[in-house]
Image: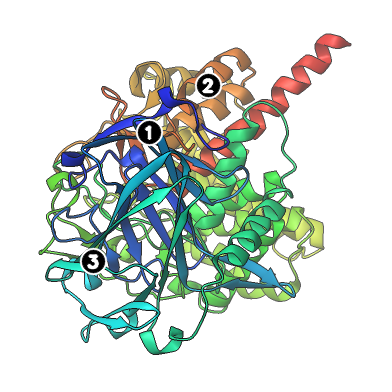
Amino acid sequence: MSSGTNTVRDRFKKIQRSDLFSYKPISDYGLIGDMKTCALIGMDGSIDWLCIPRFDSPSVFGAILDSDKGGRFLICPDADSFGTAQAYEPLTNILQTSFSVNSSEASVTDFMPCFEVGGTLISTGELHRRIECTEGEMNVVARLEPRPGYGEHVPEIEPIKHIGYAFSSPSYPNQGMTIQTSLEFEPVSRGVMISRFGLKEGEKMDFVLRFSTASSHRAIHPQTEIKLRETREYWKKWIDKCKFSGKWRDQVLRSALALKLLVYSPTGAIIASPTTSLPEEIGGTRNWDYRYSWIRDSSFVIWSFHSLGFNEEATSYLDWLLSAFCLTIGALQPMLGITGDQDLIEKSLEHLSGYKRSYPARIGNDAWRQFQLDLYGILIDALYFSHKHERGVDRKIFDYLITPMIDALEESWTKPDCGIWEVRSEKKHFVYSKMWAWVGVDRALKIAMERGYTENIDKWSTFRERIRKQIYSEGYDGELQAFVRSYGSKELDAANLLMPQVGFISAADPKMESTIDATIRGLLTKDKFVYRYLAEDGLSGREGAFLICSFWLVNCLTLAGRISEAEKLLDSVTGYANHLGLFSEELDPETGEMLGNFPQAFTHMGFITAAVNLNKAMENANSRMKT
């Protein structure tokens, strides 16, 4: 991971002009955002993914899902080939893409303004791009091709004197956009505009995209310099709250900054990923939309935010969840839209070819309809975790949310469900899901005892023990010497590695130690990547190794006292972050190629938790050695 601007020439990746309109590796992208939406920017200087006005809106630049139709905004050297490197400004989400042509260098600074004024977060609905020649002189090309509605429409273009250009589409009135620039663009085909210009050392050129109608921005100065300074100060002030220090600090800070970009600030919702349909298998059909807020993923993110000292984000998310579900616990579903939308109907975008022809590209996600038993325990655990960090749980929350969830668990815990991996085949009695039922009752009991809400303690204690006994009798296979994927199966599931972390069983317990070893034998590949499972799941094709599963294994090894194994594994897997320290959902174990949606909140959360826990264990071990 880079911590500053690259200047050493041997770090530059070579790009050919002919490569500019091909699909890039997923790892070749950086992310910027303003906590309402975000953009993926390639190492070639192209914005290939941007949805406006918010994360789950249709894309206006979507070349990552269809290089021909999706649309892009490219700024790069006007040369047959050039070198390129990317880095974030230290401790910020401001991205710098550096270019090298012969003896000349230039860099593009990309950011979306966000800063506080009087304690209120301001995000201006803009994306600023500044290219500056830092050495010699360079010829540059800017190519602009917006495509509203996931690439389905070519916008109308209106020149605005002394301002730039406005783009609009009657079919997508909320996706109006202006570009403010002093340059003139020439139309080269319908909806494609190009400008070529030269820069000498010390010269710069600004481009400002504004996400609204042209009329609202005709007389407004872009104030790029002020907004860049304020945005830089905002990110540095925010990350300065991080209380983690020790090994992997730089990577932990980058992961925290990436997670912060996935928070939708108006509500506090946390999205699983800013992209849709980046495939789990190149050319395959396992392509899902992750631009929504999963209760599970988001609650796990709370763990990582709390562990680093970012309590405000956790509180904001919980407030949003409480407003969505309090008094309506019967409507609990796996995920919501970022403003609380419940109907996330899935459909295919038939006009798009998908990333590297991985069809279909999907929007919406039908997993919202699924029964996932773990949700009750995860939500109660999130409330308990926040309670332990001084938020508390008052009587109304206990009566209107926690008690009804325990009632719901009593009614439903013996039913099969779709599990953490959201299988679309037959429901099963997943051991992981039953474990979370136990966690839900356990945390409700702890809250009740700590707050003095004692009326159900005996009843719930009996209920908790009944769940535990069933998991031990039905979920542990004596022949395999492991907790299995589902009752009666002979299959492993990496999700069971969470058992020690949630306190269901000690990592040093012989049954858990043997489960860890069985997982290493059965699901670990290349000594570093862990498959989530290898069983049939009702979907065609295959998938890569889920990165979070490797981090769960690190946690288990840490809790079992196998510190050197855990450190070796974490060092190895961390090396598969991209050049900016960003993780995808999965990796191809054979090639190391990133797969799945990017960047992935689940993966970054898993890394933070593993790094924090392992670093603490290493420090404790070193302290014991000194004494």
Where residue 571 is drawn, which disc sits there? 2
Alpha carbon of mark 1 to alpha carbon of mark 3: how far? 27 Å
- Residue 110, image x, y percentages: 46, 55
Where residue 190 is drawn, which disc sits there? none
Which residue, given by chain and number where applicable, does mark 1 sit on?
A: 493
> What is the quadrant of residue 482 in the picture?
top left
Left or right: residue 163 versus residue 156 is right
State yes or no: discs 2 and 1 in contact (Cβ < 8 Å): no
Front residue of 161/18: it is: 161
Front residue of 599/98: it is: 98
Amino acid under label 1? Asp
Amino acid under label 2? Asp
Quarter of the image with the C terminus in it: top right
Residue at 62% in and 34% down: 250
- Earlier along the polypeptide chain: callout 3 or callout 2? 3
Please rate how many residues cluster around mark 1, counting C-alpha atoms within 10 Å: few if below 14, some from 14 to 19, many from 20.
many
- Residue 366, image x, y percentages: 27, 63
Which residue, given by chain and number where applicable, does mark 3 sit on?
A: 346
- Earlier along the polypeptide chain: callout 2 or callout 1? 1
Please rate how many residues cluster around mark 3, counting C-alpha atoms within 10 Å: few if below 14, some from 14 to 19, many from 20.
some
Left or right: residue 286 versus residue 255 is left
Please rate how many residues cluster around mark 2, counting C-alpha atoms within 10 Å: few if below 14, some from 14 to 19, many from 20.
few
Q: Is residue 501 visible?
A: no
- Earlier along the polypeptide chain: callout 1 or callout 3? 3
State yes or no: discs 1 and 3 in contact (Cβ < 8 Å): no
Q: Secondary structure at mark 2?
A: helix
> What is the quadrant of residue 431 in the picture?
top left
Alpha carbon of mark 2 to alpha carbon of mark 1: how far? 23 Å
